[in-house]
Amino acid sequence: MTGEFRIDYTITYRGPDDEDFREIGFGSTYAHANVNDAAGDVEALIQNRLWETTGDMPDPETVDRPVSR
């Protein structure tokens, strides 16, 4: 098969007092010749907090990391 693969993703979160999940981020990978490389992009982008946000979505750097007080 020839062509390119890209994975579009959303990140959702449900807090302890939330009834449902809400979107907190989204993004897409670079174009790759195979699915495995595109999947590797997803992992790297998420681990490095490089997803996109809009409106009242939290800053990716603050997601699931300890809050300084």
Image (spheres, helix red, strand yellow):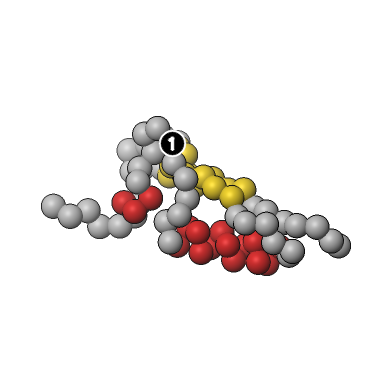
Looking at this rendering, what residue extends furthest in the right direction?
A: 1
Instruction: Judge from the rendering whether residue 29 lies leftward or rightward of residue 67; answer left or right.
Output: right
Q: Determine the image quadrant of residue 22.
A: top left
Confirm whether residue 35 shows in the render. yes
* Residue at disc 1, secondary structure: loop
Q: Position of residue 5 (x, y in %)?
A: 72, 56
Identify which amino acid the numbered label 1 is placed on.
Thr
Instruction: Determine crowd level at label 1: few under 14, some 14-19, many 20+ residues with C-alpha closer than 10 A.
Output: few
Residue at the image point whose x is 34% and y is 53% from the top:
61
Confirm whether residue 21 shows in the render. no
Q: Position of residue 55 (x, y in %)?
A: 40, 32
Q: Which residue, given by chain and number where applicable, does mark 1 sit on?
A: 54
Front one among 60 and 67: 60
Count the numbered circles shown: 1
Q: Is residue 49 above or below residue 9?
A: below
Residue at the image point whose x is 64% and y is 53% from the top:
7
Q: Name the quadrant of the N terminus.
A: bottom right
Residue at the image point whose x is 36% and y is 34% from the top:
56
Q: Position of residue 48 (x, y in %)?
A: 43, 61
Residue at the image point whose x is 31% and y is 51% from the top:
62
Q: Determine the image quadrant of residue 53.
A: top left
Q: Position of residue 16 (x, y in %)?
A: 33, 43
Looking at this rendering, what residue extends furthest in the left direction?
A: 69
